[in-house]
Image: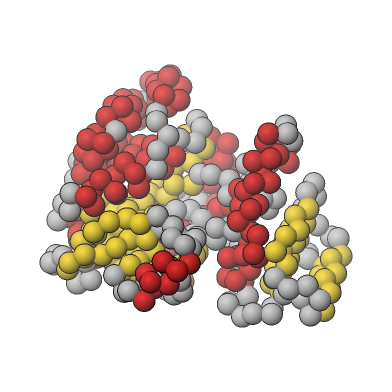
Amino acid sequence: MADTLPDFYAVIPAGGIGSRLWPLSRADAPKFLHDLTGSGQTLLRDTWDRLEPLAGSDRIAVVTGRAHRAAVEEQLPAIPDRNVFLESDPRESAAAIGLAAAILVRREPDVIIGSFAADHVIHGTRTFEFAVQQAVAVARAGYICTIGIQPSEPSVGFGYIKKDGELIVEGAPEAAVVERFVEKPDLDTAKEYFANRSYLWNAGMFISRADVLLAEIAENAPELHAGLIELAEAWDDRDRRGPVVDRVWPTLPKIAIDYVVAEPAAEKGKLAVIPGHFDWDDVGDFASLAKLNSHGRKNELAILGENARILSDAASGIVVSQTSRVISLIGVKDIIVVDTDDALLVTTSEHAQRVKGVVDALKLTGRGDVL
């Protein structure tokens, strides 16, 4: 069990619908509210359980949409009401994480915040906790810190972080300066990165003093910063909050925190990285979900669903069933079948990333009833 870090606040951005996991993931039941690993609890609850030993139950905040408040509070009964920060509509990660930073720094000027997605799968509690402890030490030294994942294979599905020289910080023996962020590569480039231990997967975890993070936003996105500060000033006043949110939130620029904080900080030598030696998966599509639930074993059929009725013969891939329908698979490889009451998806692992295109097409054709 990790020791609680007294100056640390964990922030869980719980937004997005996970469009590459449609029709399982929907606007009213996004990815983080599903059990995708067979653990018996949702990804959001798994995230809370990882962070509670480090922060304590009264120092974890969730940023989520208004529509998901009841589900979030049902999943996390120990979360204080004041630590549920509601977005009126999605405005990307810089707004979500920046809002939490702006609120928390008003409550506690020297607070260090760490942002951890609600819908990632992590195995290796002790190594995760050690990485966060190191990152907090780096943040105390005034750096913005990220946790990069040591690649287990050449992957074209993730962005990369390139490490530079060692960073000497007490309590963070593995800390390194970040040279630059790299966009998702092609396969040949990914193989080069895999062979070069200087490249880590970008898992989107950021740890920083809240005031340092906000200063970076102020420098690179002053309009966003001004809106966040105005929101934070009214947030803990129940009478003022609603009108200010309704007026200010829709005006905030939509931009990812990578572009407004991480990449500019890296260019100035203000971004550090801790290598994460734990198993990590962002469950970005059904192909990764199949791999996760078959534990990497080829020629195996993974099955998700409490009452799934599946017959298979020489089949591999994944079936996700939310109905009582009997599904029979014969002689198909790397198949993906997702069966829900109002939608059926059939594809293959090779084309799993294209599911997002189906969601886009449904929006364009006015079939939002299944989204």
User: Is residue 21 toward the left or the right of residue 107 in the image?
Assistant: right
Q: Residue at x 39, y 30 (%)?
A: 253
- The answer to which image quadrant residue 237 occupies is top left
- The answer to whether residue 345 is seen in the rendering is yes
Q: Residue at x 79, y 80 (%)?
A: 314
Count of numbered marks? 0
Query: What percent of the width, then of the height, locates residue 361?
Result: 69, 40
Depth order, front residue of 216/236: 216
The quarter of the rendered structure image containing the C terminus is top right
Depth order, front residue of 234/215: 215
Q: Residue at x 70, y 70 (%)?
A: 334
User: Is residue 155 toward the left or the right of residue 160 in the image?
Assistant: right
Query: What percent of the width, then of the height, locates residue 264?
Result: 25, 45
- The answer to which image quadrant residue 36 occupies is bottom right
The quarter of the rendered structure image containing the N terminus is bottom left
Q: Residue at x 29, y 33 (%)?
A: 221
